[in-house]
Amino acid sequence: MLANIAGMANNTPAVMHWSGGKDSSLTLHKVLQSGEWKIDCLLTTINKGYGRIAMHGVRESLLEDQAEAIGIPLQKLYLPVMPGMEVYEGRMRETLLDLKESGIYTSVFGDIFLEDLRKYRESQLGQLGLQAAFPIWGKPTKDLLREFIASGFKAVAVCVNARLLGQSFAGRELDETFLNDLPANVDPCGENGEFHTFVYDGPIFRRPVKFQRGEVVYRDYAKADAKVDSDTSVPDSAFWYCDLK
């Protein structure tokens, strides 16, 4: 009910750029609480070749169930496997212009401190006559993760940078123990891409999303069919994924 009630507090429509993870979930929670915008839809980029959320690796069917449990319509943006920036920007532009035609002029993001990314988003949107909003911008990331946990959100780590975090982090529950076990060089919210999550319950949900943990797999985007080699250093392009079903 929260999504439906809070969204009526303001008539200014917006789109939430949605990853299905902790940062976008906490951002949506704050937006719904404040009523500053009416979130008309959740926009998610999906790898068409695999049918999964881009980078996070979560199945499209779980994304659909997640959006249904929240109660906000889902807008999908399909991308080919390993798209270039030109393809990504072109398809994002088309999608946002379509949303603009329906009266949506604001894009809401869960970014926290990456200045270059914020400037990029603002520049791209500005060219389309749109604006960007960053409700959790500049907040200490350890505080944000603790707020996320204290608010009653439930999430699992679905993708971790193999160079920075071990295989054991993939599939773990996001809780105080997870936070305390993070190495000192890993941001508490994974803002630098250290890890990504799937949120399955919390104050924005009308019901929990049901899932099962599956296989944990290693993938190096710089190499085809890569396997772990203990004799070499792990590159930044390598990740551990926990498949959720």
Image: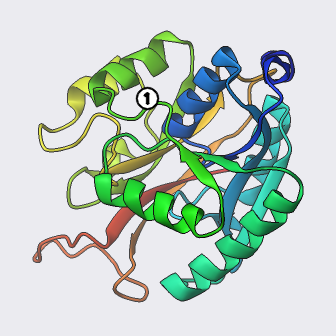
Asked which secondary structure carries label 1, the reply is loop
Question: Closer to the camera, 9 or 158?
Answer: 9
Horizontally, is 151 left or right of 189 in the view?
A: right
Question: Closer to the camera, 232 or 36?
Answer: 36
Q: Residue at x 65, y 67 (%)?
A: 128
Q: Position of residue 151 (x, y in %)?
A: 53, 12
The amino acid sitting under disc 1 is: Leu
Residue 202 vs 93, above or below: the answer is above
Q: Position of residue 230 (x, y in %)?
A: 15, 71
Quadrant of the rendered image containing residue 113: top left
Residue 204 vs 38, above or below: the answer is above
Horizontally, is 65 left or right of 194 in the view?
A: right
Quadrant of the rendered image containing residue 97: bottom right
Instruction: Please name the residue that numbered disc 1 is placed on.
Output: 174
Q: Position of residue 129 (x, y in %)?
A: 66, 62
Horizontally, is 216 left or right of 69 in the view?
A: left
Q: Residue at x 80, y 24 (%)?
A: 7
Residue 125 vs 81, above or below: the answer is above
> Do we see residue 99 in this rendering?
yes
Residue 97 vs 87, above or below: the answer is above
Specify the quadrant that holds the N terminus. Answer: top right
Mark 1 Cα shell of 10 Å, populated few (<14), some (14-19), many (≥20): many
Q: Position of residue 216 (x, y in %)?
A: 47, 56
Q: Residue at x 47, y 10 (%)?
A: 150
